[in-house]
Amino acid sequence: MSNRKLSVHQEHELLQKLEDAGLTDELAQAVIESTSNGLAKKTVVFISRGGYEATTSQKLAREIMGRNMVGIEEGVQCFGLTPTDEQLKTLSDVPFSEDVLRAHKDTHVLVANLGLSIVDIRSKVAGKGKIFYGQDWYDNQKFAKKAGQVGWLLIRKDQVPNSTSKTWNEQQALLGKDEYTPTAQEMIYAMVGYFLATGERLFEHIYVRCSDLTSDGDRVDLGYFGANGLRVNSSWDDSRNSHIGLSVARKF
């Protein structure tokens, strides 16, 4: 009985692509003869990563952060992305020192932000379960349509301590000199990527403010990422709410 997973047409196209890229009879035979199909498995893994191989800096970060990392691999696997050469170059070196990573390995998530807009993130994960709450008010908002900046983020997994029931300015006063409030895109990319990679929902019982403003001038807040999906809302800067804290990330 055939175990064919690719169509004849796909197999032909794949072989043609590989030959165009320089595959020779000798290289093909090396894959065929590799022990326990090891070379073939490595090739498939490499393709599944979008043709990406982790750098020494990224491997060290992975070793330190463990499951608290949404790297380029997760961007490929969770969002179906294929990083460009420019993006890979930008992300080649993790800008946080080994000491900083070790100090934050349990409280923060290290994220390789590949820049998908919030609207695009939602589209990419459609069909992967209840990830976004049923909302459309922000579809045409600038903060939701704009692509994020490609780069590394170190985002805290919970709200700034003692930041609820405070105004925006009062919350900002709680930040350390090496901290800042991330954008909604940065937070959502991290939260959704982390959930798809680990099954853990961050900010499940609280909203946190982000740095973005809506077209009406309200501050974007998001959270309550429970079984009904991630919610995106907004509030006045001067309002105090026991259910709204502050998101925070580490500067380089």
Image (spheres, rainbow, N blue to C red):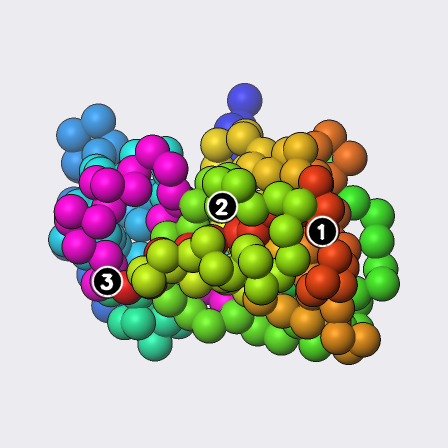
**In this view of the protein, can residue 72 be seen by the observer?**
no
**In this view of the protein, can residue 138 be seen by the observer?**
yes
Q: Amino acid at mark 1?
A: Arg
Real-space Cα separation, disc 3 to disc 1, in angstroms: 35 Å
The first of marks 2 and 1 along the sequence is: 2
Return the mark for residue 128: none
Could you say which is closer to the camera, residue 77 or residue 38?
A: 77
Q: Amino acid at mark 3?
A: Pro
For mark 3, what is the residue?
A: 95
For mark 2, what is the residue?
A: 160
**For the magenta stretch, what is the residue range?**
93-116
Which quarter shows the N terminus? top right
5 vs 69, left or right, is right
78 vs 44, left or right, is right
Which quarter shows the C terminus? bottom left
For mark 1, what is the residue?
A: 240
136 vs 39, left or right, is right
Element class at badge 1: loop
Residue 61 rendering spot, x and y as whole percentages: 23, 46
The first of marks 3 and 1 along the sequence is: 3
Taking the magenta stretch, the answer to whether it contains residue 14 is: no
- Please give the name of the residue rendered at 58% of the width and 34% of the height, measured from the top-left corner: 201
The first of marks 3 and 2 along the sequence is: 3
Element class at badge 2: loop
Q: Quadrant of residue 69?
A: top left
